Amino acid sequence: MYKRILAVSLAICLSCAPLTAVAQENEPYIAETGAADLEDTAEEPIEDPSEEMTEEDAEEGTSEEQTEEEPSEEPSDTSDEEESSETPDEEEPGEEPDEKVELLYQAHVQKIGWQDWKNSGEQAGTTGESLRLEAFKIDLGTEEWNSQIQYRAHVQSIGWQDWVNGGEVAGTIGESLRAEAMEIRLTGELAEKYDIIYSTHVSNIGDLDYVANGASAGSQGLGARMEAMVIRLVEKNSEDAPDTSGRGFVKEFSPEDLTYAAHVQRLGNLEAVTSGQTQGTTGQSLRVEGFCVNLDTTALNALKGDIMYSAHVQNVGWQEWKKNGEFAGTEGESLRIEAIQIKLTGEAAKFYNVYYRAHIQNFGWMGWAKNGEKAGSESISQRMEAFQIVLVPKCKDQSAYQSSKAAFRNTYVYQNPSQYLQIKHKQKVLTGGGYNLSENYMGLKVAYVQRKLGLGVRRAIMDSTTISAVKTFQKNNGLTANGVVDLTTWKKMGLSEDDWYNLGAYTSPLKTNPSSTRSDCIEAMIDTAYSYLDTEYIIGASGKPGTGADCSGLVMQALYSAGIDPDPVSPIRHSQPGYEYESRNLWNLPMKHVSYSERKRGDLIFYANSSGTIIHVAIYLGNDQVIESWPDKVVVWPIKNSHRSIIKGVARPFV
């Protein structure tokens, strides 16, 4: 009992120690009041504490007394302070999130694996090392918060995966697949208080801008890898939040983003078409004279860059490069575009190939060119009639555009040796068909005049009988009676002005092109000759099928259709006096002469009279058959018959 009383007394004394200290500093006050208090305490009898207080009670009491008596450095209203620290909703905007919501994220990177965890605002992944980010996960520290964050990845060859919750993996591991984009969103209480903001670093583009709250970040449809990412958890309306109005996501072009228009002979400006469609015309023999191309890169999520293009124009050559809707070519000058070039710049060039092809006169559709290559033709005077353009992401299959040759420039699949007639694959156009008909002129125009004058069937030569009939007609119609048929006399006879210029200046349409083989050329020549079967034999004529042609006139037209110009032999010269036997001049052209025993399909067989002078030419078909124009029509006959059997020799136009 004594010990317990002593402990209580000691506790009482200790509790009074501060008062003693205060009293020493305030002696007047102690002198007046402190002594009396002590005396009163000393006179009171000491009660037995065992009846009312245990040792533990004494200790608690001592603690309470000390707490009440000791001065405090904290504000006196501690209850308000404690309540404030436990209520995060009352934190000032811009402060870090509640310590219980700790944003951590981790990236799985090619060749590296899982990196260390990153905190809000730090970069996960790599830059400048060309390594793909393959997967990632996010952890907010507790199961409660992890259930309120969701995220997913857009993965190579897979697309958008399903949403996963905090702590789970988005993307793939061990499959060597790149993550290309991501989306992150909050739910529940977190979504009410915070914004989740994130950005990516993408191959061949670099850092993209921030996006927020479920928006897509990265790229899609371009085959671009996501290499790094940054994520931030920011209180709503925080002044420290990054701007999320920029370009944080990039996607592929749509067909409507690429448009191209053309200016076409006689049709003028055609409406624009979209990627892959045909611009211009086919089957109408109309030239493209100008065009423009536009690639819309104005959308927020679009790749940046220009589309540039150039035209090879008749009599001009290659023009300067144009871009983004500018006009290339000419307008109002009747000049054909012969070839084009198109290319991309900037980000568009990093992710896309631009393919294009031309539809060329006498060629049809050429193969696809790409990224600035030439499409069409040069130096062979062929008009471009139509074209197509298409954008293809580099990450996609390109095999559909790996086709035949896209352009020709004086280069042919087949060509004769330089010492012989050259194949030009160029449409022959004759001028000078409006010649007057005077003594000894021949051909179709003469035949038309004779028929109008009722001279019956006779050789189509301006002989004395024909000239006399012309004079009579002129005299009867008030014209100068000189026997020469000019345009005035021609029209007075009721003949058309078009026939006046065109009957004696016809050339067959070209049926070959630079990709034609030797066999193609031979078959084009023979096919044209067959189109003349049963056409009337008219001396000095080389007109259209069904109008009239003699032996050399038929051969001329057959050669024209296969790309050979037998100049100076021509339909116009053939009608002039002294050129009835153009077969002799054909024999003298630079063609390879072979022996009769070496004859092959497509060779020219020349016939002579008994004096050895050439009088006739035919086209050899093989099997000892020829096609020829012999009075009175074009026929297929044996190589030798009763009409002509003396063979002068064999010439080979296609060696």
Image: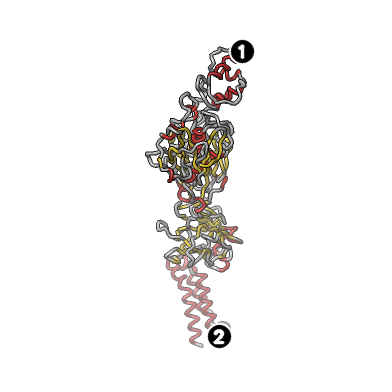
| Disc 1 target residue | 476
Q: Is residue 134 above or below residue 50?
A: above
Q: Residue at x 49, y 47 (%)?
A: 368
Residue 142: % across, % down:
54, 68
212 on left or right of 126: right
Sequence-earlier tag: 2 or 1: 2
Residues 572 and 345: in front is 572
The amino acid pointed to by label 2 is Ser
| Disc 2 target residue | 50
- Quarter of the image with the C terminus in it: top left
Q: Pick out the residue farthest to the left.
A: 419
Secondary element under disc 2, as helix, strand or loop, is: helix
Residues 558 and 404: in front is 558
The amino acid pointed to by label 1 is Asn
Secondary element under disc 1, as helix, strand or loop, is: helix
Label 2 vs label 1, nearer the camera: 1
Q: Is residue 257 above or below residue 164?
A: above
Q: Which mark is residue 55?
A: none
